[in-house]
Every structure is written in C-alpha cells, then in structure tokens.
Amino acid sequence: MKNLFLFIFLKITMNHHKTHSLFYFSLFLLFSFSISAFDLATIPFNDGYSPLFGDGNVVRSVDGNGVQLLLDRYTGSGFISSNMYQYGFFSANIKLPSNNTAGICVAFYTSNGDVFEKSHDELDFEFLGNVPGKPWRFQTNLYGNGSTHRGREERYRLWFDPSKGFHRYSILWTQKNVIFYIDEVPIREVLRSEEMRGEYPSKPMSLYATIWDASNWATSGGRYKVNYKYAPFGAEFKDLVLKGCTTDPVQEFSDIEACAEQNTHLEAQDYAEVTPMRSMKMRRFRQRFMYYSYCYDTIRYPIPPPECHFNLAEKQRFKETGRLKFGGSHRRVSRRRGRNSTPVEDSDQSDM
C-alpha cells in the first residue's frame, strides 16, 4: 500500500512539474531499488573468471570480490568466465572511467564467438565514452546464429553518471526471453518467437568484460579518439553473479536435457519476469532515455525484424531513421578485438 501511495504521489507531482520530470523519475527509480533489490549470490573473481587479454591490466581487488580493467596506450584488458552456460543470469556492479573518455568502449556481454565462429550468439551491454562535459552513452545488442548482418542495437542515455558510483547491470537469458536490467529496472526485453528461428541466441555462451580502444567508431562515429594523456582508464567490476547451467558446447544437445531442471529454476526467479510495475518502469525509461532503435530504422530494415512490436507513438517520434534528433551512418566497422558488426554511429553531439 505504501508503494501505491508513493506512485500516486509521484504521478501527481510529475504532472504539475513537467520541467522536473527527470528528477522525479530518478527519485522514483531510486526508491524502487531500495525496496525490490534482487536476491543475488555473488562469487569471488577467481572462482568464476580468468583474464582474457592484457593480463597486467587486470587488477584484482584486495578482497578478491572484484577486478579493475585498465586501458593504456599499449593494451586494453578483459576477463572471461571459466565456464560456458546454457542460459543464465549474468550480473555485476560496474563503475566506468571518468574525465575524457572519448573513443573508449567498456563491454559486458555473453558470447560464443570463440567456439562458433560462423554461427555465434551474443548479448551485449556496450558503454561508449565521450568528450569532457558530455555523458557516457550505452547500447544493448543481440545476435543469434551468426546473424551479424542484422544488428539489433538500441542506444540510450542514463539518468545518472556511471563514473560516480557503482550500478548493477544484468543480462537474463532464458529459452523464453532476454531481459537487460540496470539496477532493478528492466530497460529491454526480447521475447523468443517462432519467426526469429535461429536468430534467437540458443547455444552455450561465456560471460566477458572488456575495455578497449574503439576510436574508429565509439564517439561521434570516430570523430573523437582516445586521448592517452588521461591514461590509464579504469573500469571497475565487483559483486559478480554467474547463475546458470554450466555446459560443454561439444555436448550441446545432451546438455540441454541435463540443464532442464536448472533452467526451470532460473525461469522461476523474480528477475525472470517483467511484472506490470516493471513494465511501467521499462516503458518510462525507454520514453525518456532511448534515442535509437533498430526496429524503427526503416532505412536499414525496410522489412522489420520479426521480434519487433511497434508502438505507434514511438514510431512517430523515431521517424524512418530509428533515432530521435539526429542522423548517422551505418557503415560496417571493426569493433571488439577480431569481431565485425554493424554499429549505429552518432554523427552529432547536440542531443547530450
């Protein structure tokens, strides 16, 4: 009942103070976090992960519960989970670098590209640095069965400064749906459908985290590069969560049966469902902070991908480019180490 009164109060207040809607939205979200935090079991870094590259720039915390990934002029760095998972919940409290972060990409994602090179699956959080005085932005993405020709990017702003403190970023992946969370707010859900066929991620994946030089595309389509005068740049990860059925991709089909009980347990967790209250939070987040969606980009996709469900009001706002206030190109560029895709680039900084 208390939560209902708070919601009504904030609704009334926001209606009377439109110019302060961002403040009240943030207040509402922060209060929600305090009363609905997920029940998560974390693991020490060494129990679930190992360095991926740039070993000297992978700095473990004193308590063993976290790690700092550094980028300097010689190398970036990253870590990978020790096991692969057939569906799961992957989560970490993350704090991003501050100051001049143009050209930097920090990624928190699942992938099996090292095992299935031509038919890989992937689920991404990618955080994109910026010039001084401009905020971090980020995107989520989904690939299935090597469908890199069909990027499913959505790009957003945040309601907080991710370099000032830790916030929890989570990826839920089940055989029914994918949900991206920031703290306890769902920002995106992709429901599996028959029409998606193999383009829904379904093969075992590892969890990765990386920091790297993405000067050629991350900030204004490559206009601003990494300035190593400010190096090293550090991204911090702690309170790591790995929940799912560990599996051997070589034994993929038999493991699906072996994982059935654990997957049923995963789908029964609180965070596996977008409840009506969470749906409201997701809708509000997307209305205020999403500035690009592939579903509305009819230039790239005259025939929308099958999982897209259109909201008429959103469609009118995003026009044919899929973005709100400024355009951009869609040329293919190299992104993470040794991987190609089709990122959507920002060609203007005016909306920050």
Image (cartoon, rainbow, N blue to C red):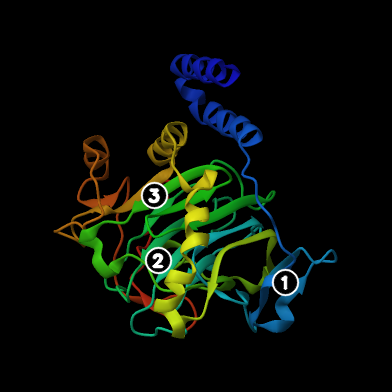
Q: Distance of mark 2 from mark 1, alpha carbons?
A: 38 Å
Query: Residue under circle 1?
Result: 47
Which one is in front in this view, the residue at disc 3 or the one at disc 2? Answer: 3
The amino acid type found where label 2 is placed reads: Gly
The amino acid type found where label 1 is placed reads: Asp
Mark 1 surroundings within 10 Å by alpha-carbon count, few (fewer than 14), some (14 through 19), many (20 or more): few
The amino acid type found where label 3 is placed reads: Glu
Left or right, 250 with respect to 118, comes to: right
Quadrant of residue 305 in the image? bottom left
Q: Distance of mark 3 from mark 2, alpha carbons?
A: 27 Å
Residue 192 vs residue 166, the one in the foreground? 192
Q: Earlier in the sequence, mark 3 or mark 2?
A: 3
Q: Are marks 3 and 1 in contact (CB under 8 Å)?
A: no
**Where is residue 200 shown, x and y percent of the image?**
32, 65
Left or right, 185 with respect to 98, comes to: left
**Where is residue 242 shown, x and y percent of the image?**
61, 63
